[in-house]
Image (cartoon, rainbow, N blue to C red):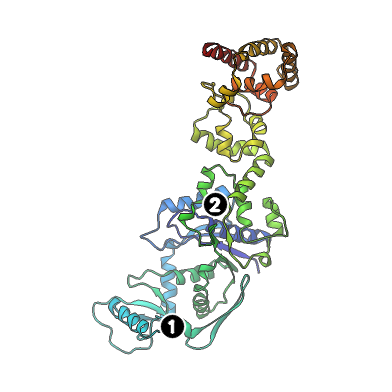
Amino acid sequence: MKVRTRFAPSPTGYLHIGGARTALFSWLYARKMGGDFILRIEDTDLERSSQESVDAILEGMAWLGLDHDEGPFYQTQRFDRYKEVLQQLLDSGQAYHCYCSREELDELRATQMANKQKPRYDGRWRDSDATPPEGVAPVVRFKNPLEGAVEFDDQVRGKITVSNSELDDLIIARSDGTPTYNFTVVVDDIDMGITDVIRGDDHINNTPRQINIMRALGFEPPRFAHVPMILGPDGQRLSKRHGAVGVMQYRDDGFTPQALLNYLVRLGWSHGDQEIFSKAEMVELFSMEALNRTPSAINQDKLMWLSQHYLKNLPAAEIVEQLQWHLQEQGLDTSAGPELADVVVAQRERAKTLVDLVASSRYFYEEVTGYDAKAVKKQFKADTAGYLNVVHDVLAELPEWDDEAIHGAIQQACEQLDVKLGKVGPPIRIAVTGSGSSPSLEVTLRLIGRERSLQRIQRAVNFIQKSD
């Protein structure tokens, strides 16, 4: 049987990191097994669902490169199908109308809690012959088996058994006729031929109910894998107070999708001691058996380490492509200046994120309008203007403007001045970049260009002379 997995988010907010990890595991398993990955939008909560959230989910999936083979399917477009299956269950006696009012259910719950019983529906309308009360729109409840147990082999947790006596008759359609989550999921998984469901273990209580509904409809359930939740650094469930954000916020903060995917795959899965995985390696090595049973905690330092790794090792052209959004956001025009790929190669060793890379590269494309105050105080001394004048003149005479020639010219200036590079190098760097940090001098000057470099050195000379 061909493997078919699905990712089925509810569009009530952004695509959060837990959802993205679930999507990744489902995508990896489908790709590993040569199967299909289906995207389904569970938007039956009409009050909380929004097109903005749908767009955020689709954008996040696309940015991560988790392509789907079918979908996106929308539950709100399948109401006729749910109604048909609902009627099927009613006709077969496996579902029934319940006319309990909210007050009756509240009273039942209060009585059970007072008697230290587990709050649950008592099945009073399950086989009732009573005349339905007038003016009450009934819900539809699934007639859960009264005896036996639901048993399934979870691919993360192992064998799980739940007695049917622990499960009450679940509402599968509200009084306005709209279907509920546990019912629509079952119908969708049947119709879409889902063979494997990978999801967070917060859904594990739903699984026995869904299995019973599925079997009542004459189908065997898919295989289930319930992965532990992601925790905050303090060991508590991840939440906004931990800084939990949507996937696209990681894009906005300057992380590459490769870094985030690598980070996500290690939150609950491992392959020996390996830390760095290409997407192809993830597909090749992924297995359900290697999914962890214990929760994983967010580690921002690990994500930053991965970010630096990918900035250093991805092809420059790929980083250039990912930089485009950040260039626009930070308002940096790179059309007049060195090739962006060359700047990436020069700068990536000292950048942690794409945001850093853009911010630290402005001097390659924009004029230096000021100098770092601490750097000026430390390096711009009374004799610095004279040093820079000599450097300027030696550089101006170069027939070629390349790394070797620039390096040789600076060395020549040092010899002519009878000083070490430490006296000349830092002031040159401040003059051409405005700060004390940049790639090597020859690379920095080459990328800035002859004319701009000479102009900036002369401007620094004038600045120092005016400051004396």
Mark 1 or mark 2: whose residue is earlier in sequence:
2
Where residue 70 appears, as percent x and y from the top left, is 56, 58
The front one of 187 and 59 is 59
**Residue 324 drawn above or below residue 440:** below
The front one of 2 and 136 is 136
**Residue 123 drawn above or below residue 70:** below
Label 2: how many residues lie within 10 Å, few (<14), some (14-19) or many (20+)?
A: many
Residue 99 seen by the camera: no
Residue 227 seen by the camera: yes
The front one of 303 and 83 is 303
Question: Number of numbered discs present?
Answer: 2
Q: Which residue is mark 1?
A: 143
The quarter holding residue 289 reads bottom right
**Residue 283 drawn above or below residue 160:** above
Quarter of the image where the C terminus is located: top right
Q: Are marks 1 and 2 in contact (CB under 8 Å)?
A: no
The front one of 31 and 109 is 109
Quarter of the image where the N terminus is located: bottom right
Disc 1 marks which amino acid? Lys
Residue pushed farthest left? Answer: 134
Q: Residue at x 57, y 44 (%)?
A: 255
Q: CA distance from mark 1 to mark 2?
A: 38 Å
Where residue 154 appears, as percent x and y from the top left, is 61, 73
Where residue 123 appears, as percent x and y from the top left, is 38, 85
Q: Which mark is residue 61?
A: 2
Label 1: how many residues lie within 10 Å, few (<14), some (14-19) or many (20+)?
A: many
Where residue 274 appears, as percent x and y from the top left, is 72, 55
Could you say whether the residue bearing mark 2 is in a helix, strand or loop? helix
Could you say whether the residue bearing mark 1 is in a helix, strand or loop? loop
